[in-house]
Amino acid sequence: MPVWHEKTRALREAGDLVVIGVTQEQHPDRCSLYAQWQGIDWPILWDPFNLTGSAAVPVVLAVDEAGVIRPGRLDVRRIEEQIVEGWMSTPPAKPGPAARRPYPDVVPPSTRATARSPGDKAQAALSRLLWSRTTGEERLDGAAFADVLEALEKAALAPKADPALTFHHGVALRMRYDSEHRQAGDFQRALDAWMDALGRRPSQYIWRRRIQQWGPRLDKPYPFYDWVEEAQTTLIAAGSVPHPIQIALSGAELASGTREIPIRSIQDIHPDPQAALKRDGKHLVELESTVCLHTGVTSKRVREPAGSSRIHLILRPTGGAHFEPAAGPARIWIEVPTGWNTPRQLLMATSPTDPDAALLAEFEVRPPQPDLTKPPASPILPATIHGTAFYFVCEGEQGECQFLAQDFEILIRDPRSDPQEPDK
Amino acid sequence: MRLPVTLALIGPLLIGSVHSNQDRSLSLLQPGEALPALVLPTIDGKATVNLADLRGKKVLLIQFASW
């Protein structure tokens, strides 16, 4: 986009052209940082639910004075010919057809009429989610999140519902996951919804990218947000305050794609082979795992064996407990099923900078490659990964601090044979 | 035998093409059609834009992601 920004500068400054951006990203703050870094000063609209229905980005469209989208593909290398000499020199277009209103209830909540039908309620839910950041009284609390999720799920589960509605439900679940009202399993259910939607519309690349953002490196077309650090550094060096990133970037969002995850070459040593360390019986730390499968699982073609995935682990202190930063990072030991590959068995979680903050760890697994010349001996999925988390945690302000362990299991399942559970 | 082999080879491409066309037809932003009256907030949350209100101006609509 920086090229389009530069090439249209003179036309914009002369008042001959209006440029409007639309981004379908889940998190608008990242695009805000990008725009700040690139000096983009035209408005960028936030369309996380992909209400425009676009199948892929980038797409650049010329719209004439009549509001009609001009035919033809725009090429930034031919901007002089296509726009400056061509389009700009044509007389104003005649009045065009009336604009359709596909989402009449997706409007700022303060201007919205009461929704009555399920479809209206789903659109009202979308508008609450889109504008909840900006209107203080509309900021969603836990009950409001439950309401909008119920409306969106009901719309998604209606007979013959468009898979876009399932995608919308997933976006809303991820929004709640990013809020203080998150519920265990929100992120997993978001991924399941997106995978379900993608399975029904496989060439929807906006949806596919939403999954791949958090998916395994084997499924990554490019690193998604590896530019963020450079943007922040450049802006600080120039004396600017970078636009804050509200939701921490996961390792998946920074990772590059690869064609082969490395075979384990380091023999890690189990931190507690006798299981002697005291288990976290009081559940001072809540451990949540989320499995992001390779999007190839939605295809009947065997691009990648089902089960190839990236696992996101989050350790959250509960009930006033907190991590002790001086004790170093938490460690995670994982055991994958026989024949499966993962680069390391011993993982380090992110170091706690804030004692109350959650710790993150991510890893990738790949099942054995199927022998396509033989009938499958047994299905690869479901499969279970076993593991143990080791951490130093303190109870309350003056409470005891100790090293504890917590055993866990992660189920990797095929979403095609195990559809998501209804909202509770 | 040549025809079935050819079909087998190009079949997936045809299916892919059908999918692409289906998805294009689902887009609200179709060449030759008016911008829909779709209301969206800006990424900073400070403003709201109705695409249909852009009439009367030459507009370049850029759909992109920051990655």
Image (cartoon, rainbow, N blue to C red):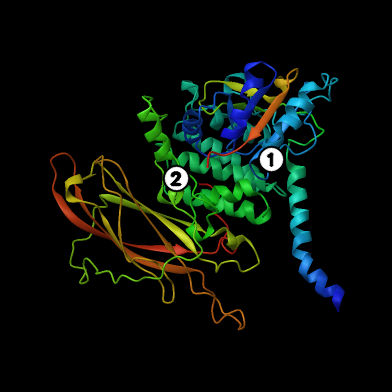
Q: Is residue A418 visible?
A: yes
Q: Position of residue A218 (x, y in %)?
A: 51, 61
Q: Position of residue A63 (x, y in %)?
A: 75, 27
Q: Nearer the viewer, mark 1 or mark 2?
A: 2
Q: Name the quadrant containing residue A91.
A: top right
How much space separates mark 1 and mark 2, taking CA atoms? 27 Å
Q: Earlier in the sequence, mark 1 or mark 2?
A: 1
Going 40% across and 33% down the picture, which residue do you hit? A234
Instruction: Name above or below for residue A266 compared with residue A314.
Output: below
Q: Chain of mark 2?
A: A
Camera-side residue of B11 and A336? B11
Going 55% across and 45% down the picture, which residue do you hit? A170
Q: Position of residue A249 (x, y in %)?
A: 41, 43
The amino acid type, in three-letter code, at marker 2 is Asp
Residue where numbered disc 1 is placed: A53
Secondary structure type for disc 2: loop
Residue where numbered disc 2 is placed: A226
Q: Name the quadrant containing residue A245.
A: top left
Q: Is residue A2 left or right of residue A289?
A: right
Q: Is residue B53 left or right of residue A405?
A: right
Q: Is residue A325 left or right of residue A52?
A: left
Camera-side residue of B61 and A389? B61
Instruction: Name above or below for residue A95 compared with residue A223.
Output: above
